[in-house]
Image: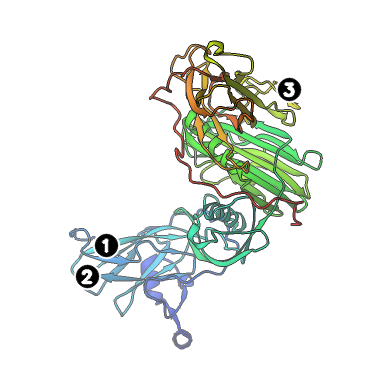
Amino acid sequence: MVGVRRVLATLAALGAIAVPIASARAQTGTSPSAIVLCPSPLPLGVTPSPVATAAPNPAPSSAPTPTAVPTATPVPLGALRIVPVKPQLNVGMCARLTVSGGVPPYAPASAAGNVAAVAQPDGTVLVIALRNGTDTVIVIDANGRSASVPVLVAPDAGVLPATIALRLSGGVTADFEATALTSELARRSHLQPGARAVPIAAGALSSNLSVGAPWTGTVAVALSGRDRWRDVNGTVPVTIELVAMPQLDPAQLFYSDDPEKVLGAQAGVLFRTTLSADVPTARVFAYHEFEQTARRLYVLLRSGPTSHVQILGGGAGPSFTTFTGHTLTVRYLLARSVQQSVIATLDADPVVLEVGNAGEAQQLLTGLYDLRLIDGGPVDVAVVAGFDSGDPGVVTLVDAPPTTPPDKDLHDRAGVYPLDAVAPIALSASILDPKYRLSTAIGMSVRVGGWAVPPIAGKRYLGGDYGVVRQFRITLTNATDQPGAIYLYVAPSKAGSTTTMLFDGNPPQVVLSTALCLQGAQNAPAFDTKYLLKTFTVPPTRGGAPVVVTGQFMTDGGSSYPAELGLALDPPLPLPPKTMCVSPSPTPAPLPSPSPAPGPPASP
C-alpha cells in the first residue's frame, strides 16, 4: 500500500490525475487495472486531442453489468445543468464536467459502465473513457436533483491530412472551391464507415483564383462521426492552384441505367468500364433509384499507377424524376459552359464521387461527369450502389460481387456509346412579306430525343439522347421593314417532357443567357400542340447578316421523349401553369468566364 501511495504521489507531482481505485471500482465494477490516467490540468469542458493515428473500427463489446444508479427525485427540467452537453472521447481520454444549478456534493454514476464518473473536490465531475460504446453520466446533487449527459466513446472519425493540395480548372467560384476541397478532405482523411467531412466555408477560400498564382492558407476543417465516431476538428494548410486545360469534349458515353431500380439490399457494382490511353475522354451518365431508403450511389475512379484525371460535372437527387433530371442537366451545362472542373490525383486513395445525397425510397439519384485521363492509367470506372452507413465501404463493394445478384429490369439500358458523331441541331426561319408568309418550311423544326446511337459495348441502341450534348444553331432573318417576332416552341409527345437549353452569349465566349425547362402539358397530343419557350425579336436584316443564336441542348433524365423543337411565326400556346419540372435556379447567378485561352495541359 505504501508503494501505491508513492506512485500516486509521483504522478501528482508530474501533473497527472489518478482516479482513486475505490472510486473507479465503485463506479464501473471493474478491477484496479481499469484505472486511467488523464492529463492535468484540463480546461473545464474541453477534451484533449487524441494521437493522430489510423482509427480502427470499434469492435462491439459485450454489454457490461450496469452499475446501480441512485434513484433521482424528479425536479423541473433545467434545474441542474451540465457542460459539455455531449462529450466525445477516445478510450483512455477524460473530460471534466462542470455542474451548475445544484448543491454539492454531487454523486455521479455511469449507466452502462463504458466510462467512469468521479466527483472531484472542486465540484466538477471527471469522466474517464474505459471502452468503446455509448453511455450516460447521471449526476445527483445533495438535494436529490439530477441531470444527465450522453457520452460517446469511440475512435476518431478520421485523421486530418498534414496538407491538402487542390488543382482546379476553368471558371471557378469560392463555392466550387469549397465543395471540391471538402471532397478532397474526405478522401485524404480516410474516414471511418459513415463518417462525413463537414462542408468547408467558402468564405475562408480565395474568390479570385488565376492561372499561375496559387492560393495558400490555413483552413478550419471538421470530420463528423455522425454519433458513431468521435468528431475531429482542426486546421489544415491548403494550396489551391488553377490550371489551364483544353476544352473537354468526351469521345464516348459510359451509360449506367440497368437496373433502373435497385431492389432491396442489393449492393455492389452496377456498371464498370475503363478509361485508358485508347479512350482518354468519356462522359459518365448514372441513373438509378433505390427501393429502400438510406442508400448511396457512387462513381468510383481508381488506378494502379498514379494517374491524373480531369473531372467535370456533378450529381442530383434524391427527388422525383423530372425535377432531379432537370436539376442535374442545369448544373452540368452551367459547369460545362465554363469548364469548371477538378484535376484529381489517383494514387493509393481512389476518387469516390457521391451522386447526390442519401437516397429516399422510390426517388431518383443521377450523375453526369466528363472525364479526361491526363496521364497514367488505365483507370477503373465503376458505378456502385452502397449504403448511407458507409459499411461496407465503396472499395469493398467494388471488389466484391453484389450482395444480391442484380435483378435487371430487362431494358438493357447500359453500355458504351460513341459521342464523336453527335448531330447538331440547326433551325432557321424567315419573316417575309406578309403575302408570302410561310408558317412552316423545311428546317423550321426537328424531332429531338429520338436519336439512336449504336453501342460500342452493350445490347441496345441509345435512345432518348440521354447523356448527349447537342449543339444548336438558330438562324433568323427578317425581309420586312419592321422588327418582327419568331417563336421557339416545343411540341411534346408525352406529358412530363423536360429539356434544358443553354444559350450562348454575345460575344461568343460562353456566358449564360437563360436556361429553359421544356415542360409539356398533361395529355398533350403527339406533336400537335406547340408551347412557347422563347420569343426572338428580329430587326430587319434585308439581305444582310442574319441573327444567329447558338447554345447547347440536352434531354433531361426522367423525361418522356421524343418531342418536336421548332420555330413558328405565329404565337404558340403558353406553357401550362402546372408543371412537373421546377428549375433549381430560375435566375442563375452569373458564372465566371473560363480560364484564359487554354494551351496544352500543365504537367501534374
Which mark is on residue 102?
A: 2
Q: Residues within 10 Å of mark 1 (few under 14, many from 20)?
A: many
Look at the numbered disc 1 and give the secondary structure of its residue.
strand
Mark 1 / mark 2, whichever is N-terminal: 2
In the image, residue 402 above or below residue 240:
above
Query: Where is residue 597 drawn, in percent x and y?
Result: 70, 50
The residue under label 3 is 454
Q: CA distance from mark 1 to mark 3?
A: 69 Å
Which mark is on residue 147?
A: 1
Badges 2 and 3: C-beta atoms under 8 Å apart?
Answer: no
Query: Where is residue 279 drawn, in percent x and y?
Result: 78, 38
* Residue type pointed to by label 1: Ala
Front position in the image: 353 or 479: 479
Q: Quadrant of residue 177?
A: bottom right
Front position in the image: 265 or 371: 371
Q: CA distance from mark 2 to mark 3?
A: 77 Å
Q: Residue at x 53, y 15 (%)?
A: 493
Q: Quadrant of residue 367?
A: top right
Badges 1 and 2: C-beta atoms under 8 Å apart?
Answer: yes
Mark 2 / mark 3, whichever is N-terminal: 2
Q: In this rendering, would 42 be left or right of 590? A: left
In the image, residue 591 above or below residue 100:
above
Mark 1 / mark 3, whichever is N-terminal: 1
Residue 216 in view of the camera = yes
Q: CA distance from mark 1 to mark 2?
A: 10 Å
Front position in the image: 168 or 481: 481
Q: Residue at x 62, y 65 (%)?
A: 163
Front position in the image: 398 or 431: 431
Q: In this rendering, would 46 be left or right of 483? A: left
Residue 69 in view of the camera = no
* Residue type pointed to by label 2: Gly
